[in-house]
Amino acid sequence: MAKQRDYYEVLGVPRDTSAEDIRKAYLKLAHKYHPDKTGGDKAAEDKLKEINEAYDVLKNKEKRAKYDQFGHMGEQMGGGEGFGGFGGFGGGGAGGFEAPFDEFFDVLFGRASGGRGGGQRRSAARQGSDLEYRLNISLREAATGTKKKVKFARREVCSDCSGTGAQPGTQPQTCADCQGTGQVRRAQGFFSITQTCTRCRGTGKIITKPCTRCSGTGRSRAERELSVDLPGGVDTGSRLRLSGEGEPGEHGGPRGDLYIYVEVEQDEIFQRDGNDVICEIPVSFVQAIVGDKLKVPTLTGEAELKVPPGTQPGTLFRLRGMGIKDLRGYHKGDQIVRVQVEIPTRISREQRELIERFQQMSNEKTYPLYQRFMEKLKKSLGG
């Protein structure tokens, strides 16, 4: 009988790995073996089930601790703290074997005689896998909040067989090996070991005539559309959890969740800096010299900006409360306007003559920055 693989080996991670690395490894493998990628290949489906089983244990702190101490046997021990006087029989470790804790009492008190027997053991309900969805939105949508429709594929109960996995008009048969319990008991010397039935894979049922629509899985792929409300202030990396919108659970377990990861697209006008936005506005050198009133774009329309006379290139102006709403709703950021003074590259003869005349009329007061620089230079040279 095939030995159940180590969960860390299934996910391809070392035993001392972090919970976050376990999650990343699971998502990578789940994506690789997802039915959408494999076309419903049976081997890939079995692999995905194994991956989900491993992640279900290792993502849970208490389950993982129990598994690290007792191996696969820890999954069947319930809330027990250990073996007490039977500490030498640990499962999963070197030299140990996998057997439920109550099997020892079956043997010690004569309740087991090897082979099949015991109470009905049903496969535990297991939550379905989580799904991920990448949602792209514009910066303006991120600033004000938006409602989006998302379409994604997930498994649903097969409409043809109503989830039984059997062809319409037929029913799954009780597994002859485990008598419908999903588990078989094997005698090994003094002790008996309970293991998942390999014939029915722990379901207790055998499907002799699989449903053609779902290939006997009881699930089929279906498109689902949801309307999602995104609050103002979301940014790239923001995550929204929709409970119960993931893959269906096993053995009556609840559905997994749908996680929507937000990706804010680059804007042609604005750059985001936290809750502030920055935009660069070109002005003519005449506007910078004599001043002007400008209409500047904002995330929600336009605003008036007064450019005072003598404005220098790179000057920053702040429009209070014209930025992005704080995700917690406490305040709004500002819009920062950076002035870019544009110098003409082509001028007429008349324009050139006027500029030259302006230069002739200029003195040291016309360019105070230049004069201060020359004074510092002269001082540094010892002049």
Image (spheres, grey):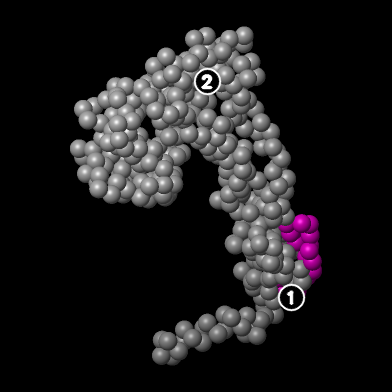
Q: Which mark is residue 217?
A: 2
Q: Quadrant of residue 193?
A: top left
| Residue 192 position in % (x across, y down) | 28, 29
Give the secondary structure at mark 2. loop
Q: Quadrant of residue 108?
A: top left
**Residue 301 drawn in magenta:** yes
Name the residue tied to disc 1.
308
Q: Quadrant of the C terminus?
A: bottom left
Give the residue type at disc 1: Pro
Q: What's drawn in magenta, residue-wise?
A: 280-304
Q: State whether residue 53 appears in this view.
A: yes
Q: Quadrant of the N terminus?
A: top left
Give the secondary structure at mark 1. loop
Residue at the spot 66% in from the left edge and 37% down from the top edge = 150
Give the residue type at disc 2: Thr
- Residue furthest out toward the front: 109
Q: Residues within 10 Å of mark 2 (few under 14, many from 20)?
A: many
Considering depth in this image, is 75 or 54 the residue closer to the camera? 75
Residue at the spot 32% in from the left edge and 22% down from the top edge = 115
Considering depth in this image, is 320 or 369 the residue closer to the camera? 320
Q: Which mark is residue 225?
A: none
Q: State whether residue 21 appears in this view.
A: no
Q: Is residue 308 above or below residue 45?
A: below
Q: Residues within 10 Å of mark 1 (few under 14, many from 20)?
A: some
Q: Is residue 77 above or below residue 201?
A: below
**Residue 245 drawn in magenta:** no
Residue at the spot 69% in from the left edge and 55% down from the top edge = 232
